[in-house]
Amino acid sequence: MPTKGSPRPRLWVLAVVGIVVLAAMLALSVLSPFAGGVLAQNGPIRLMSTEVTSEFPQGIRFRVSLESDNDIDSVSVRFQTGTEPRKSYDYLDLEESGDLVDGELLWRTNTTAKFIPPGTLITYNFEIEDIEGNRLDTEPDEFVYVDTRYEWEEVEEGAVTVAYHGPVKQRAETILDAMTQTLAVMGPLLGADITEPIRVTMYNNTLEMLDALPPGSTTIRRELITEGQAFTNIGTLLVLGSGRLARGTASHEMTHILTHRSGDSAFRSVPAWLDEGLAEFGNTDPSLSYTVAVEFAIETDRLLHLTSMPVLPGDPEDVIIFYGQARSIVRFMVGVYGPQPMTELMRLLKSGEQMDDALLATYGVNRLGLENQWRDAIGAPLLEVDVRERARPTPIPRPTVSAYSLSDLISGSQATPTPTPEPTPTTEPAATPTAAVVAEAAAPPTATAEPDAAGQDEPGGSACSRPSDTGPRGVDGAAVALGLGVLGLALGRRLRR
């Protein structure tokens, strides 16, 4: 038996451990550091370097340098754009000089079909194969496609990251705060995944943001300011940080992303009335303009047959009514029935259920029944049309209005192809989503002007943009006062009945 203090047992253990570590190091030295571990760096294909750079707004440039004992058959890049489940794939152009091979590809992002918004996270890897069938796949790596005109900094909390440039960190933190509040409330309500990343690029003024938007209408770019735009499949959001509606815009667009994650299926998308209603329900900074629109619609018998409309209406006046009515119905659904049916409704829609079937399973009524319950709650006439007949939905016939019109209220003009929003009253406190039942929704003046009726042609999936008019039709405090006057008139009429 070894005497006390004998070092032999300890030395023996250390020797064994050393041999094991050495063997492990030797094994690792001959294994490929790439996915699959099939080939070694000293094998027939030897990767020298890779590089990915942003060449905004033209595109993303991928480069590879390698050595090969055999002629290279192909070098390709496979990448995922944000949280988009599908991957893109293309081949690099090759130049060979002896054993050295350089590959390069510019993936263009400045077309409608391939547009990628700045700030999007790109996850990519390279796949290399020679003429003998030897193959080397690199490990996935990440790259952020940035707007190279500016030097960006970031603030982040949880899954949300806000990129900004210049001395505007406080604005970025305000946007971040609004989005994290929305995530905390709307995530559980919708049953959405709140761990997947959401990236925001915040611009300081309109001119900066114009070049970051998708290729679009010259008229829209000239006449409108886009307050924000969400790319729901990708999980990327562009926001105008200097806009007076920045907080509300960020929370509204964040909710669109969450709704897409929780309710859109491979078969159909969440209908526009529910999608926009949820987005305004999740808005942390609403104002009074949509309340005015709903009251106006009630008094003039212009409420829309909302739940039968798969997309936004084309009439600018109806668009504003649509937003106010949609938010009011969502507030009714959550206030009367509680949050659980909404969570279950989104789950059923995600599984591919049709809207009427999903509503019957969760709320016990179809679309017509739900809308009539809401109309009864606000004292509006009930609908008699059965949406199951699937007749083409049309607005309720409008009476002639001579004293006031919504066009007069908003701008005094019907020339613009999109509704003109109103500024948020400075005296109104910011609101967060609640379960209170109200007859109408106090929502921000951010009626959406989308590239098409359904918004499905935007890159990255459904996109919602929130423009403000910059021309002479813009709304000031006087318009808000006029709107309040109309609301007072409507209330006075009810009291006289």
Image: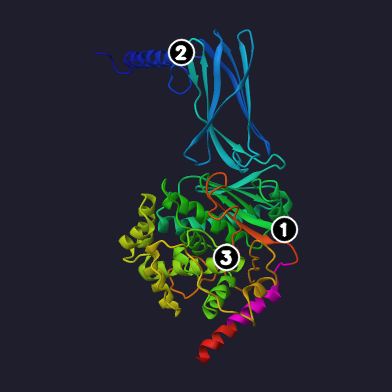
Magenta segment boundaries in residue numbering: 473-487
| Residue 361 falls in image quadrant | bottom left
Please tell me the numbered disc located at residue 223. 1
Does the magenta run of residues contain 481?
A: yes
Task: Please determine whether, in this image, residue 256 is positioned above or below residue 322.
Answer: above
In-front residue for pair 373/332 = 373
Task: Please determine whether, in this image, residue 24 is positioned above or below residue 108.
Answer: above
Q: CA distance from mark 2 to mark 1?
A: 62 Å
Residue 286 is at least partly visible in this image: no
| Residue 245 falls in image quadrant | bottom right
Residue plotted at (51% across, 10% down): 44
Q: Earlier in the sequence, mark 1 or mark 3?
A: 1
Q: Which residue is mark 3?
A: 319
Does the magenta run of residues contain 30?
A: no
Secondary element at tag 2: loop
In-front residue for pair 485/451 = 451
Q: Amino acid at mark 3?
A: Val
In-front residue for pair 345/404 = 404
Is label 2 or label 1 in front? 1
Q: Amino acid at mark 2?
A: Val
Q: Residue 395: x percent and y percent? A: 51, 69
Please tell me the numbered disc located at residue 30. 2
